[in-house]
Image: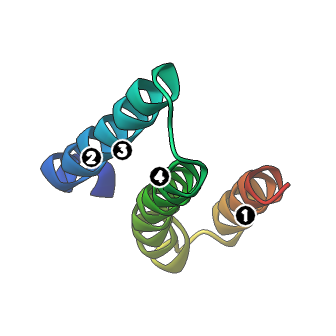
């Protein structure tokens, strides 16, 4: 069973919190939002998304890279993570 499936409930809870934060931001922007409160909400959304990314990345590194015994497959996995991180940090 994959690390994502094992942690499904925990990950879904993170996604639900993230969705709630985005919906709160949308609701605030539909009204007359305070700039600082809006910026704070955006920062919270970014932090929640990064936390989700790190949670899944951590499991992936342990299960698909550190535990991989085939050097060629390990190199493929590393290249895949590198590409994702390059895209993520742009």
SS state under label 2: helix
Front residue (pair 68, 9): 9
Q: Tell me which numbered mark, 4 or 1, is placed earlier along the sequence.
A: 4
Question: Of discs 1 and 2, which sits in the foreground?
Answer: 2
Label 4 to label 1, Cα distance in Å? 43 Å
The spot of residue 62 in percent (x, y) is 43, 75
The local crowd at label 3, few if under 14, some if 14 to 19, many if 20 or more residues have their Cα within 10 Å, is some
Gap in angstroms between the C-alphas marked 3 and 4: 11 Å
Camera-side mark, 4 or 1: 4
5 or 20: nearer the viewer: 20
Q: Is residue 1 above or below residue 63?
A: above
Residue annotated with mark 4: 41
Q: Who comes first in sequence, dot 1 or dot 2?
A: 2
Q: Is residue 13 left or right of residue 3?
A: left
Q: Secondary structure at mark 4?
A: helix
**Which residue is the site of mark 1?**
72
Residue denoted by label 3:
18
Q: Position of residue 1 (x, y in %)?
A: 22, 50
Q: Position of residue 6 (x, y in %)?
A: 18, 54
What is the C-alpha distance between the residues marked 1 and 2? 38 Å
Specify how the rendered protein is coloured.
Answer: rainbow
Q: Earlier in the sequence, mark 3 or mark 1?
A: 3
Measuring 72% from the left and 52% from the top, which residue is drawn there?
84
Please provide percent x and percent y for residue 76. Answer: 73, 57
């Amino acid at each position: 069973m994959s690390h994502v499936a094992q942690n499904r409930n925990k990950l879904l809870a993170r996604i639900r919190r993230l969705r709630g934060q985005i919906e709160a931001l949308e609701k605030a922007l539909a009204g007359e939002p305070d700039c600082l409160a809006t910026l704070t909400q955006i920062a919270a959304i970014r932090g929640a998304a990064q936390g989700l990314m790190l949670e899944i990345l951590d499991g992936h590194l342990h299960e698909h890279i550190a535990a991989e015994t085939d050097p060629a497959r390990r190199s493929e996995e590393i290249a895949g993570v590198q590409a994702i991180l390059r895209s993520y940090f742009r």
